[in-house]
Image (spheres, coloured by chain):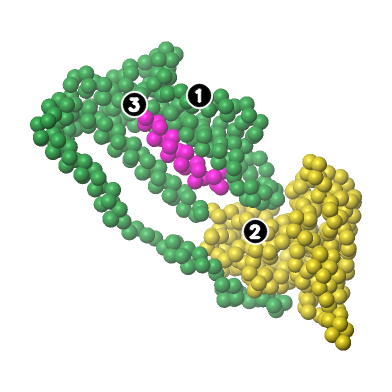
Chain colours: A green, B yellow
């Protein structure tokens, strides 16, 4: 490098400048790694299997009536029963539809308002305290008002899911943007980026990990609020299945609905987690 | 590819900067000719980086005027490009993608990539265009930051202690690279440093900043053509003077000899 004609020394820099300790590991990270970690899958399934065994033992011990605690197999047959007459798919379908539409609307609004509040100290001063106060309202408290204003159709249910999804997304994005990496933002400014370009090319990518954790929290809270919405004034959906089975004494369907909610919530999180992994593969 | 730029002159007139009641810089007068390499030397926290940032439009003077090429600096200046102490690369972009940040915005997409790679070649990183910042060493990351600045074809290249965080060997290589790039592009360079030898090696003139609030205490011409070996005997007296100005007096070899007799 001390010679004046430095441009001629093509490729010599690999030898003149040792790559840091990260380089070797990073090259390994670039290789495809389809290897499933079976041990972690087995570890994750261990507890459910134990709980299933305890459940079976408790149900067959005679300490509880089948109306209180039906055995696992009767819950499975309830699943088969509802799947057989097709009503299972209707309930799951309508619930998933409400969550997706409500989440899209709530997360979208949360993203927009979070971005504005995160970027402008003035807007934050006016808006943030009121939003924080609204956030403290419990999900069920919204239901009577939404029914009064929006009737008993899809409107109030989707709106409640949207409210649930809105707050985690809004909170994480406004906080993350307010504390975006000042060094990178300054580089963006120094290289002529302003306004929307600075936001899109530097600030949002730099807070992408926070955006994803906000989205995942928002989706989870969307499912929580969905059940609140479907418990009241509905005739379809997994939340409706909970109240309906309670009223008709079908504890097997009640337990099945709970397990389905857990499974669907987890499935949604896994899907979003896969998207996150893909999008953030080059982040630190 | 030619890396020749149109070097710009810089002129500071009565420049001061205060943060609230706290005055950091006062009455700085300085003229830098097009193509000149000037080192701003001073103790930590004396405001030399602030001065550099005002030339680049990242900071605004509270008094006086900053002019580049005869035009007042108002906001981020397209004629300037900054290299910071840290590489500050975007971790989600490749090295080529990071360099592209310095290219003109209206450049067609297919040209952006090829030009980015050419600029990476200028800092001897042609084989690393598709690497991510975390995959390369600190020295390579800093060279990428230099390529990003060069891609802007700046009239004034602003270097804010760009070698301070590098190990000694990498620092020497970077100094050689900057010297080489400057000679081939002819760009004006303002280098902020607290390393006296670095200043004597790279600069045509050394501006020693000092006092509280900081002003220009000494401006020294460095004799001899670049690239310079800072062990040249005629630089010893300059080094002593600068170190004394920084508050760490050292004897020159000549003084040591006479003292021993």
> In the visual, does B128 lie left or right of A8?
left
Q: Residue furthest top?
A: A148
Q: Tell me the chief SS of the magenta region.
A: helix
Q: Which residue is depicted at the point 54% across and 53% down?
A: B92
> Which element carries disc 3, helix, strand or loop?
helix
The residue that disc 2 covers is B86
Whether residue B151 appears in this view of the structure is no
- Quarter of the image with the C terminus of chain B is bottom right
Residue A174, labelled with which disc?
none
Residue A195 vs B194, above or below: the answer is above
> Which element carries disc 1, helix, strand or loop?
helix
Q: Position of residue A128 (x, y in %)?
A: 58, 29
> Which element carries disc 2, helix, strand or loop?
loop
Residue A227, labelled with which disc?
3
Q: Which residues are magenta?
A: A203-224
Same chain check for tags 3 and 1? yes
Whether residue A57 appears in this view of the structure is yes
- Work out how far the residue at label 3 is from the one at label 2, CA to CA, in angstroms: 50 Å
Dot in front, 3 or 1: 1
Mark 2 burial class by Cα count in 10 Å: few <14, some 14-19, many 20+: some
Disc 3 sits on a residue from what chain? A
Tell me, yes or no, whether the two marked residues, 3 and 2, touch with CB atoms within 8 Å.
Answer: no
Q: Which residue is depicted at the point 66% across and 72% down?
A: B168
Q: Is residue A217 magenta?
A: yes
Q: Residue furthest bottom?
A: B261
Mark 3 burial class by Cα count in 10 Å: few <14, some 14-19, many 20+: many
The residue that disc 1 covers is A134
Quadrant for residue A207, please give it. Answer: top right
Disc 2 sits on a residue from what chain? B
């Amino acid at each position: 490098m001390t010679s004046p004609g430095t441009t001629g020394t093509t490729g010599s820099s690999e030898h003149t400048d040792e790559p840091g300790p990260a380089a070797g590991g990073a090259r390994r990270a670039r290789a495809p790694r389809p290897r499933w970690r079976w041990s972690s899958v087995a570890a994750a399934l261990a507890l459910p299997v134990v709980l299933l065994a305890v459940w079976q033992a408790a149900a067959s011990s005679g300490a509880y009536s089948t109306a209180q605690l039906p055995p696992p197999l009767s819950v499975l047959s309830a699943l088969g029963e509802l799947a057989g007459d097709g009503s299972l798919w209707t309930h799951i379908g309508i619930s998933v539809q409400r969550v997706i539409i409500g989440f899209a609307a709530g997360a979208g609004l949360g993203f927009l308002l979070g971005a504005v509040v995160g970027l402008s100290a003035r807007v934050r001063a006016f808006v943030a305290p009121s939003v924080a106060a609204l956030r403290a309202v419990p999900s069920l408290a919204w239901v009577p008002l939404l029914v009064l204003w929006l009737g008993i159709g899809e409107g109030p249910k989707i709106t409640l899911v949207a409210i649930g999804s809105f707050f985690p997304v809004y909170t994480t994005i406004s906080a993350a943007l307010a504390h975006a990496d000042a060094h990178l933002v300054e580089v963006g400014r120094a290289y002529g980026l302003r306004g929307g370009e600075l936001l899109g090319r530097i600030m949002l990518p730099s807070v992408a990990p926070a955006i994803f954790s906000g989205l995942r929290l928002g989706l989870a809270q969307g499912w929580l609020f969905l059940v609140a919405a479907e418990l009241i004034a509905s005739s379809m959906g997994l939340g409706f299945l909970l109240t309906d089975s309670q009223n008709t004494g079908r504890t097997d369907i009640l337990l099945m609905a709970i397990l389905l909610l857990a499974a669907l919530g987890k499935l949604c999180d896994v899907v979003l987690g896969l998207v996150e992994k893909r999008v953030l593969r080059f982040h630190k | 590819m030619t890396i020749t730029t149109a070097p710009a002159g810089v002129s500071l007139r009565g420049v001061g900067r205060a943060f609230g009641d706290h005055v950091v810089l006062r009455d700085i007068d300085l003229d830098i000719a097009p193509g000149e390499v000037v080192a701003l030397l001073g103790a930590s926290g004396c405001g030399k980086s602030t001065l550099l940032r005002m030339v680049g439009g990242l900071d605004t003077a509270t008094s006086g005027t900053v002019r580049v090429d005869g035009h007042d600096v108002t906001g981020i200046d397209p004629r300037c490009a900054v290299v910071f102490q840290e590489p500050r690369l975007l971790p989600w972009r490749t090295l080529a993608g990071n360099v592209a940040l310095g290219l003109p915005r209206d450049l067609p997409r297919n040209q952006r990539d090829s030009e980015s790679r050419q600029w990476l070649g200028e800092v001897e990183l042609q084989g690393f265009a598709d690497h991510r910042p975390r995959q390369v060493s600190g020295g390579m990351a800093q060279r990428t930051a230099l390529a990003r600045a060069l891609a802007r074809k700046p009239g004034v290249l602003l270097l804010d202690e760009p070698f301070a965080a590098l190990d000694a060997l990498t620092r020497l290589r970077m100094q050689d690279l900057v010297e080489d790039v400057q000679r081939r592009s002819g760009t004006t360079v303002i280098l902020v440093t607290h390393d006296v030898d670095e200043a004597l090696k790279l600069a045509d003139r050394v501006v020693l900043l000092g006092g509280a609030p900081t002003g220009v205490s000494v401006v020294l011409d460095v004799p001899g053509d670049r690239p310079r070996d800072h062990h040249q005997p005629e630089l010893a007296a300059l080094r002593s003077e600068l170190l004394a100005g920084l508050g760490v007096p050292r004897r020159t070899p000549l003084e040591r000899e006479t003292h021993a007799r």
